[in-house]
Image (tube, grey):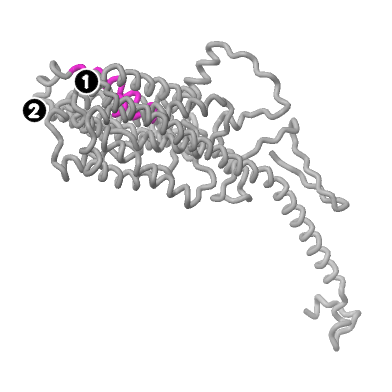
Amino acid sequence: MEQKVNTENGNVAIDFPGDGSYNQRPHSPTFGHVQWSKFTIENQTPHEQNDSGVNAEVKKRRTPIEWSKKYFLEGQALTSTQTQALDKLGPNAPWHEKLIVKHRRLVGVAIPFIFFQVIWWSCAIKYDFWNLFPDRFYISITMIFGSLVAGMTSEGGGAIAFPVMTLVFGIIPAVARDFSLIIQSCGMTAAAFTIFWMRVQLEWHSLIFCSLGGIVGMVIGLEFIGPKLTPPQKKIGFVCVWFSFAFALFLLNLYHKRKTYKVIPDFKLWKMIVLLLTGFSGGIFSAIAGSGVDICSFSILTLLFRVSEKTATPTSVVLMAGNTVVGFYWRQVIQQAVSADAYYYVAVCVPIVVLGAPLGSVIGTHFHRQVLAGLIYVLDTVALVGAYAIVPLTKALIGTSVGIIAFGFIFFGLITYAGQKIMEGIEDEMEQFPQTQVNCEADGKQNRDRNNKQEEETRDIDLGQLNVGFSSATNVSRQL
């Protein structure tokens, strides 16, 4: 939107072309006020760019096809580099360039799939993995769904594997936790490669600082906290915490037109500290249940910093991939405590998850953020109901679970409230920006006019009157 400034007669008038509407834009201290419009275009989510303002016509009811396209074929949120590459791809481009740019998704899924399949098949032939399937095929079937969810949402494969293995199949939590760490270090790593390859929009502040905090939290959780919890406490605690988060996210998304961002706006030191603490807490959860840093990062990004689910989801996938590698390394190399059963379960699932997780990440990048949030509601609610139906409940365990849920409601509610206050501060700053920009432009124009006038007056001075030996009739330019 261009704006014209008229400074005649000392008055400043703004002319906004179009229908007279004006959409507020987020502030970016990184780029500064000078590059405001460029930042807002790149940082906005698609539904915000298409806001029509106060003079918009009432939208017509969508047909089923239009509804499906909106929520399931919204399109990927790609980086500007990949978007420019797609725009510049011509019909006469070489075949390899078309393959890399136009069919980037297919290549991104194929590379990790082929890599892990070669390794798995060579090991399966060498060590005869076929005998493991008759007694463990149910885990393979579980991870068909679990791997898709892992790549598609912030829940991670462990959020499916851990409750199903412990609640449905009666596997001890330590084995389920180790299995979750190992299988996600394969599947989530494959999905992370696909996300990087497709150049999907990520929140790099969260990746860096949550990863650092997650490493410390993972080590402390494996060494000191996890061994002190009983299996029922681990099962109930896991599902109660994330049900509280899902409920808070549901309340937030009741306001469908809420403003969201692709990255954290106005990044400051205190936000870095929050991300470090988030990673630390998530690392402890991952050490207990095999999953957690991804959901912690997702909750802070969406509730506190109002980052869109389309950015928070792939960010959580990449974050969990790195955190599970650290956990697997610590359990196997430092503690040397991974059981053989965990490896057997991994052996029957690797060829499935290395396809399902990258495929899920591709599918998830096309879904509307409300669909991604809806999947989280369903998964966390089913896990909570299943836990109460299967886990033997005592009075102490019931009281603990109710206390966790109540504390979770309060905690995530406070985060949501804080996020709203942060948004109000950003919006107040946005309201002040247009007038500040206009005043700066008006002052700049007046200064330029004043300088031009002074230059013209300087040219009109007869230098001969100021210097002895010069004649007023002499052409000053020639003497100079």
Give the secondary structure at mark 1.
helix
Residue furthest front in the image:
395
For label 1, the residue is 139
- Above or below residue 150? Residue 464 is below
Image x and y of residue 404, in percent: 37, 31
Q: Which residue type does callout 1 highlight?
A: Ile
For label 2, the residue is 127
Image x and y of residue 450, in percent: 81, 62
Q: Quadrant of the N terminus?
A: top right
In this view, the residue in front, 334 or 435, is 334
Give the side of residue 412 with respect to residue 479, left or right.
left
Q: Which residue type does callout 2 highlight?
A: Tyr
Give the side of residue 241 with respect to residue 471, left or right.
left
Label 2 – label 1 distance at C-alpha: 20 Å
User: Residue 457 falls in which quadrant of the image?
Assistant: bottom right
Dominant secondary structure of the magenta stretch? Answer: helix
In this view, the residue in front, 215 or 54, is 215
Q: Is residue 144 magenta?
A: yes
Image x and y of residue 152, in percent: 38, 26
Image x and y of residue 279, in percent: 36, 43
Residue at point 87% right, 81% down? Answer: 464
Residue at point 39% right, 45% down? Answer: 277
Q: Which residues are magenta?
A: 137-160
